Image (cartoon, rainbow, N blue to C red):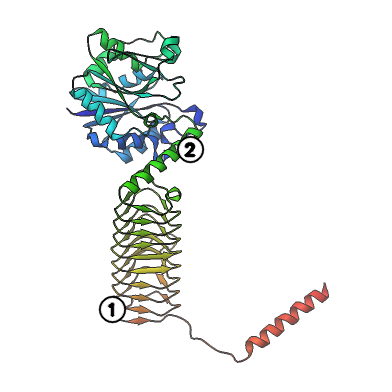
Amino acid sequence: MTTALIVLAAGKGTRMKSDLPKVLHQVGNAPLFAHTLAAARDLDPARTVLVVGHGSDLVEAAAKEINPDIQIVMQEEQLGTGHAVLQARAALKGFDGDAIVLYGDTPFIRPETLDAMRAARANGADVVVLGFDAADPGRYGRLVVKDGALARIVEFKDATEDERAITLCNSGVIAAKASTLFDLLDGIGNDNASGEYYLTDIVEVARAQDLSAVAITCDEAETLGINSRTELASAETLFQNRRRTEALEDGVTLQAAETVYFSLDTVIGRDAYVEPNVYFGPDVTVESGARIRAFSHLEGCHVSTKSIVGPFARLRPGAELANGAKIGNFVEIKNAQIGEGAKVNHLSYIGDATVGDEANIGAGTVTCNYDGVNKHHTEIGARAFIGSDTMLVAPVRVGTEAMTASGSTITKDVPNGALAIARADQQVKPMLAVKLFAKLRALKAKKKKDI
């Protein structure tokens, strides 16, 4: 059975105290709703519909970056979750598969949980509701189960004292055949304490039509919704702890796991070694056997097997390290390809460049890539040797097995195998330093006396 996702992302999130729509606040350097989409990726959804409202233009732009095929529908008025889901009806017209309703501010649903819901549908349940046993049920809606079947869902505001004593709570996540879901929503009303159309009311409507409803349970942490900055901070902690555990279980060594920070899309291969205080920004892949040394910051980069990065290194977007490359302390790489076995070990900036295999870049080297208007490319050939404190003024090419002398400013191409020296001749003036210092001290003493 094919599956469609309906992701509700229309809320204002007033408790966030922000001009930014709630679902665009980030955990693991990704919008909250991106986590929801990632959890459902294994379902291989045929269609994904995002229901937007407050800040719709911003949410739509972010959603299209993640999934260009996502369908955006607008909920003009906030009339409840049932009303929100109904906005997806036109987008799913003619769709004959199942629909799963998810929430853009609930980022921790696991793929395994969604698989269990789909399995329950395959086993014959007409409506599947995700619930959890709450340590403190508070104001959650309660799942009323009778004889193993889900009888109804009652919101806290409308619950009796006996119903409020139930600890099995509603997450809001629901699965059903798409056509059944919309038909059931046509049968709900808003005669309740909030005057809203509750999605959860479809259970009673379903039972009245002799349709079956069941509850699938998950860990309470999966249902965590984000409504405030405090909850956002707690969610970040939960996300990081989960990702650290996953990395360790996947065979990655984290020398001080609690100091390493991941993004949602971070990929790290088996037997990679990560030292303390490493930050992985968005879009980072580290292959097996690489070592990321302490206090390094990576984003938008690819580190191949057996490469070494850091300590105190920064890899910016477009940095591509081939097998066995070495990037050392206080080195920054941006939009540059570093060849196999190449070394950039000390205090250098390599931007908008190609560095050939086994090239050696000396300390203090800078590719001067920006003229104030445009960026220009630097090419360094295989096995080239760039002397310390070389300024490479792009566009420029240093050929295969060529060399630059330390302290040079290279403005012209260097042929293969050539040595380029571009610095002023050194002049030595005997005893001039002693005379100069004596003169400076005398001037300083006179100035103090005049004061």
Mark 2 vs mark 1, CA separation in Å: 55 Å
Depth check, front residue: 74 or 339: 339
- Which mark is on residue 233? 2
Quarter of the image holding residue 357? Answer: bottom left
**Residue 180 drawn at (x, y percent):** 23, 17
Q: Taking 410 as reference, is 311 above or below it?
A: above
Crowding near the residue tagged with mark 2, few <14, some 14–19, many ≥20 C-alpha atoms within 10 Å: some
- Which mark is on residue 416? 1
- SS category of the residue bearing label 1: loop
Crowding near the residue tagged with mark 1, few <14, some 14–19, many ≥20 C-alpha atoms within 10 Å: some
Depth check, front residue: 30 or 252: 252
Q: Residue at x 46, y 77 (%)?
A: 407
**Residue 172 drawn at (x, y percent):** 35, 22
Quadrant (top left, top right, bottom left, bottom right) of the N terminus: top left
**Residue 367 drawn at (x, y percent):** 40, 67
Q: Amino acid at mark 1?
A: Asn
> Mark 2 vs mark 1: which is more N-terminal?
2
Q: Taking 426 as reference, is 74 above or below it?
A: above
Quadrant (top left, top right, bottom left, bottom right) of the C terminus: bottom right
Q: Nearer the viewer, mark 2 or mark 1?
A: 2
